[in-house]
Amino acid sequence: MFSTHRFTLAVAFIVSLVTIPFAQAQIQTYEFSGTLDPNASQGFTQFYISVQIDSTAILVYQDPETQHYENAVGTMNFSLSSPNSGVGAPLNANYSGTVNEVVYSKGVAGDSLQIEAIFDTVFAFPVTARGMIHIEQIEQPFIELSGLFPGVLTGSYSATIEFAREVYERDATEPFSRFAGAGTVTSVVGTLAAFDTDRDGVIDDLDLCSASLVEETVIFGGWLDSGVTNYTDESGCTIMDRYAACEAEEATQPTSPWGWFQPVYSGPTYCEQQVVYGLQDDGIIDYTEGRMLRNALNLSHSSQGPS
């Protein structure tokens, strides 16, 4: 049997726990660094952890506060040090996953991120490696849950962290090598510079349309595709947002007391008609796209809908 204390505290401890090739994956890399409690971390005082996540991973559970993905972890790397440490040798191996999941959560007490991976490999002899990371936000939120794949902000964020790395002989119940640590995250490097909840390319602080209609092309009436790209302007509003604003404005107009005998106009409103000219004046669309929008808008009002 191997000793459970095969790494000394006098040198830096660097572990590349997991390496899995992603096929046509879209990779997000999260980096966390900060300080460790030496009493809870075998004498180490600093840590750096990086994890590569596949944003095309399988979503197995979702609610307004939680998103749970499987087959999401590509690499998981730990680097630990103490004040008098040198540089240790990395452990490099290729793994195939048996448990591989990421859970993102938002809550009143704070955001949390939990990553777990269990992998089988042959490293001198058959072994099973397990990596676990749990990060709990203390103050400002750093996880974006907007219905799409979550993102993690870059910045100085305060969070608690607990993590463990274990290596087992194949089918053994106790690890022959184990490290567990606990401490405080002081720096986060993610894929987001700021929250962009509706993912329209304009951050929330500058976005005048915080819940944009982000269909790829402009759709009228929920069914008629104009074929015109649903561009987003500098204020964070899409073309469809502009038409939706006209609908909202129309809904607030008072009803005429004589409406019971007045003919009902079923064509585009004046506001909707003016949208095209505003888009052209702003340089968002050209004349051809403007004509396509006008034709589609008129057809959506005159038609009974999709056949």
Image (cartoon, rainbow, N blue to C red):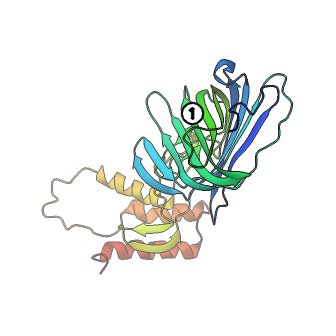
Residue 180 location (% of width, % of height) = 63, 30
Using the rendered view, name the quadrant where residue 79 is placed. Answer: top right
Taking 32 as reference, is 160 left or right?
Answer: left
Query: Looking at the image, can residue 188 be seen?
Result: yes
The quadrant of the image that shows the N terminus is top right
Q: Amino acid at mark 1?
A: Ile
Task: Indicate whether 52 appears above or below 133.
Answer: below
Residue furthest toward the bottom? 307
The percent coordinates of residue 163 (x first, y second) are 61, 34
Q: Residue furthest top?
A: 39
| Relative horizontal placement of residue 174, taking residue 240 as reference (left or right) | right
Asked whether the viewer can see residue 200, the reply is no
Read off the residue under disc 1.
135
Depth check: give the residue in front, 50 or 187.
50
Residue 246 location (% of width, % of height): 39, 56
Seen as rendered, the residue at the extreme left is: 260
Name the foreground residue: 55 vs 220. Answer: 55
Q: Residue at x 49, y 51 (%)?
A: 69
What's the residue at 66%, 39% (across, down)? 154
- The image quarter containing residue 26 is bottom right
The C terminus sits in image quarter: bottom left
Q: Nearer the viewer, residue 36 or 166?
A: 166
Q: Residue at x 37, y 71 (%)?
A: 223
